[in-house]
Image: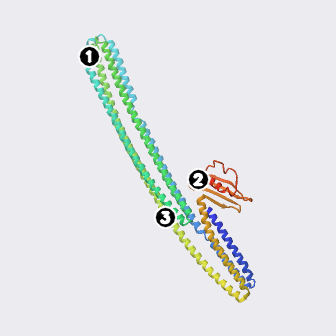
Amino acid sequence: MTKRTSIEAINKNNYSSIDDIKKSFQSNMETLLEKDSNAENSYKRKYINLKESVGTIKKLRFTETEQLFEEFKIKAEQRDSDARKLINKIKRELDNYKTSNKVLKETLNSNHGFDCETIRKDILLRVEDDHKFSISQLKLNYDEKMSQLESSSNQMIVERDQNKEKITQLELEIEKLKQQNQEQQEKEKLEKDQLEKEFQDKIIQEKEKLEKEYQQQQQQQQKEKEQQDQQDQKEKQKIQDISLIIKNNEQIDQYYKDIIQELKLKFEEESKNNNLKFEQIIKKSEEKLAESSKLILKLETEKTDLLGKFQMLSNKFQEKSNNHKELLMQFEELKQNIINEREEFNNIKNKEIEQLNKKLQDKSNELQELKESTEQSKIELQKEFEDIQAKFDENLMEQLKKKDQELEDQIKKHNEEIEELEERLEKSNDDSLPTVENLLNQLKDQKLELDSLISKNTTSLKYIELFEIFTHLKIIQVTDTTYELICQNQSNNAKIHLKFSIEEDGSYSCSTISIDNCKDENNMFSEEIIFTKEDASGFLVNMLSIILNDQ
């Protein structure tokens, strides 16, 4: 906008100088043509027609470019709406996946219908009842079975050794089960880490491709900026669209990273819960073994105290040994049930892992499709931009050719009319020749001044562009003594908007209009600032330091 305003101000100055020349030429010609009223009327009509045609040419200069710009804006808005619809669709699918994961988590927390605590309580109650009953029977038959204890002591020692061997075997089997579970968990972790690495590598490669394409597009845009200044706004809009697409892709990548992180945390929680359950079962089995060993120790102490009465208690001890065997059988059955349930749980877990892998594959396919669609949209945008540019160039060339042809025709007509007027003037009055020659000389001088003004305007436009590039500063004239200063950093959108006025004593005063995306730590622009020409460079350096330090 500032470039356009500065260019329009320069064009106004040019047009004002042209109008001055026309006015002077008109006044001089009117003084000459007062002698011949018919010639004056015809010249005035032709002059008015020429003036109207010049006005129509000026009006038709920017009409088609504005229409093309509005069409491009409508297409960009339609493309943004399509991208928003696609993002909303992906969000809905994510919500569906989250609900399915919640259902899976609730099924895992229910332990698949296996209740270890009730089984443990039943076994402990049976052991306590049997122990109480045995003690009561021992007290009743104490005197009768002392003689039988001595004969059956050797058998009891043999059975004790057998029981110890069975306990050691059970401990070895439990350790093997622990090792197998640890190996399975390590394998599952390695497989998951590999999947995550492959997925992250794919994401990184795709990001690098997008960044390379983005850099190539930026280089092309810089070359086009040097060739044509009028394409700056359109190319900036194109760069912003591409950056929005890249940001959308990064947001989508972040969504998938969050999903993978959630799945990873869920799997770790499930593995921890499974390990805790397995450790609880092992602890229960160890407690059961400790209880059985305590019973054996109690029997050994009773044997040492009641060696004389061992025969009376042999039958009861036989019953006790049978009960102990039944407990071992129950323990083996419980162990087998635990192993079977563990296998079922592993099968269910493997199925769930396969389902999760399928979901991840589906998500990766969707991401690939989305990236392909973004690439297609890029290609379509590029084609649309090239078509619009070609149409714009063709229309400009046609308009310029038409305008050049019209101007040449008008110049020819004008020259013919001038020649006719000169001939008439020569025929009518030879005294008017020196005045016409003077006017023609004035016209030539004024044309030379016009050419010099046009060359100065082109150089001043270049100076303004260089000034804006090096200082990040844009100046808009409001009145003859008041201006607006806009100092903006395009990288972080830091912006300082000031009102600048020239005082009568030659000093300058500034007041703030707005400060965006930057911090005025020294409160430099909190109040009105008044400075001289010598302090202008320091004022500019301080303003640039504020917008550049916030990067």
Do the residues under discs 3 and 2 have CB atoms within 8 angstroms? no
Mark 1 to mark 3: distance in Å?
Answer: 101 Å
Helix or strand or loop: what does disc 2 sit on?
A: helix
Q: On the image, numbered disc 3 is attached to which residue?
A: 383
Residue 107 visible to the viewer: no
Task: Of the two numbered discs 3 and 2 on the same chain, state the one appearing first in sequence.
Answer: 3
Q: x and y percent of residue 471 in the render?
A: 60, 58
Mark 3 to mark 2: distance in Å?
Answer: 37 Å
Number of disc labels: 3
Which of discs 1 and 3 lies nearer the camera? The answer is: 3
Helix or strand or loop: what does disc 3 sit on?
A: helix
**Tag 1: residue type?**
Ser
Task: Of the two numbered discs 1 and 2 on the same chain, state the one appearing first in sequence.
Answer: 1
Which of discs 3 and 2 lies nearer the camera? The answer is: 2
Depth check: give the residue in front, 323 or 90: 90
- Label 1 crowding class (10 Å Cα cut-off): few <14, some 14-19, many 20+? some
**Tag 2: residue type?**
Leu
Q: Quadrant of residue 137?
A: top left
Task: Establish if 126 lies above or below 260.
Answer: above
Which of discs 1 and 2 lies nearer the camera? The answer is: 2
Q: x and y percent of residue 394 in the render?
A: 53, 71
Mark 1 to mark 2: distance in Å?
Answer: 97 Å
Task: Establish if 302 lies above or below 508.
Answer: above
Task: Of the two numbered discs 1 and 3 on the same chain, state the one appearing first in sequence.
Answer: 1
Q: x and y percent of residue 64 in the render?
A: 58, 69
Depth check: give the residue in front, 488 or 385: 488
Q: Quadrant of residue 424?
A: bottom right
**Tag 3: residue type?**
Lys
Q: Residue furthest front?
A: 534
Q: On the image, numbered disc 1 is attached to which residue?
A: 153
Q: Residue furthest bottom?
A: 427
